[in-house]
Image (cartoon, coloured by chain):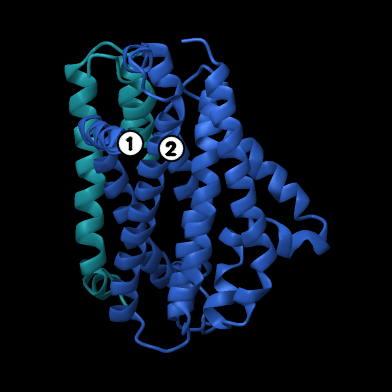
Chain colours: A blue, B cyan
Amino acid sequence: MITIAFIKKEIMETWRTRKILILVIVFFIFGILNPLTAKLTPELLKMSLKTTIPFPDPTSLDSWLQFYKNISQMGLYLFAIIFSGTMSHELAKGSLTNLLTKGLQRRVVIFSKGFVLFGQWLLSIGLCFIVTLGYTHYYFPDNKSPHIWLALWPLFIFGLLLVSLLLFTSTMINNNFGGLLGTVIVMIIFNLINLYKGAVNYNPISLVSKNLTIVKDDTKFFDLWPSMCITVGLAIGLLYLTVKLFDRKKL
Amino acid sequence: MNNAQLLLDNLPLLIPLVILEFGLMIAAVVHVLKHPQYRFGNKVLWLVIVIFFQIIGPVFYFMFGRGETA
């Protein structure tokens, strides 16, 4: 009951601070940019190189390539920027003190924040996906990308890790940049791990970088099982650590 | 394909894109001008960031730049 009340409070907050509005606008823009970039790149190359070599016409695959590139290189970090101070902001303002001294369990705060954050991740990715899907169907009516729905799942699963990472770092570091910093550092570490080729299928970053191969070939989805399990495991571990850390935190 | 036709072809993409990007930019510009208290930086700095860095600039301002009494 109290959890539901706190979830409502979180939803109200994301509405009042206009965070949800910014998310919707930004990811809508990304959704439009994907097919546009796919469509214009060959034209721009033609104009700037002034050659008569025929470029291959863009296909729906190019549009989805842009989608996964934009999400993993921009969208992810924008999400981190927007929710970078989700815990540290409240701790700094002291807005939780009253509730916690009146008997609100600390883990309820973490869980409801995580729940609402993940909901917003689903919303942003879903919106961007639907916009890209609509335009891609309109501009590139081919069947070169048969498994777009399946390729979306790893992104959702990666969101679990991103959300718990944001919660953990913004609880740990008393600074509005904490969440962003944590996300950037962890992404760098994942990228470094990827230098070792054998680790690719175990690396959580494959969930946001290997999607295009799934779009082309659905059997590739099952190669990513280990990485999905590790991602979920890491997310749960981080969430547990966050609860422990927050329990010991002085208000 | 000539330029005019290229533009015409992509209008369904360009119109919403321009509306959203300018909407975000103008909202941020208005906010910068109306709330002259920032966590750091000054008015000119934020105006430059908001106007010249599409998407990232306004988001950065709304998250880190705007003062507490939003």
Residue in the image at 65% along x and 36% along y = A185
| Circle 2/circle 1 CB separation < 8 Å | yes
Circle 1: element type: helix
Circle 2: element type: helix
Foreground residue among A137 and A120? A120
Determine the residue located farthest toward the bottom in the rendered image: A143
Instruction: Name the chain under label 2.
Output: A
Residue B2 in picture, x, y percent from top left = 31, 76
Residue A146 in picture, x, y percent from top left = 46, 85
Foreground residue among A171 and B5? A171
The image's mark for residue A3 is 1
**Amino acid type of the residue tagged 2 in the rendering:** Phe
Q: For the N terminus of chain A, give its image quadrant.
A: top left
Q: Relative to A98, is A244 above or below?
A: below
Q: Relative to A99, is A220 above or below?
A: below
Asked if residue A179 lies left or right of residue A116, the reply is: right
**Residue that numbered label 2 is attached to:** A111
Q: Relative to A53, is A158 above or below?
A: above
Q: Is residue B20 visible?
A: yes
Mark 1 Cα shell of 10 Å, populated few (<14), some (14-19), many (≥20): some
Q: Tag 1 or tag 2, which sits nearer the N-term?
A: 1
Tell us which disc is closer to us: 2 or 1.
1
Residue A109 in picture, x, y percent from top left = 40, 29
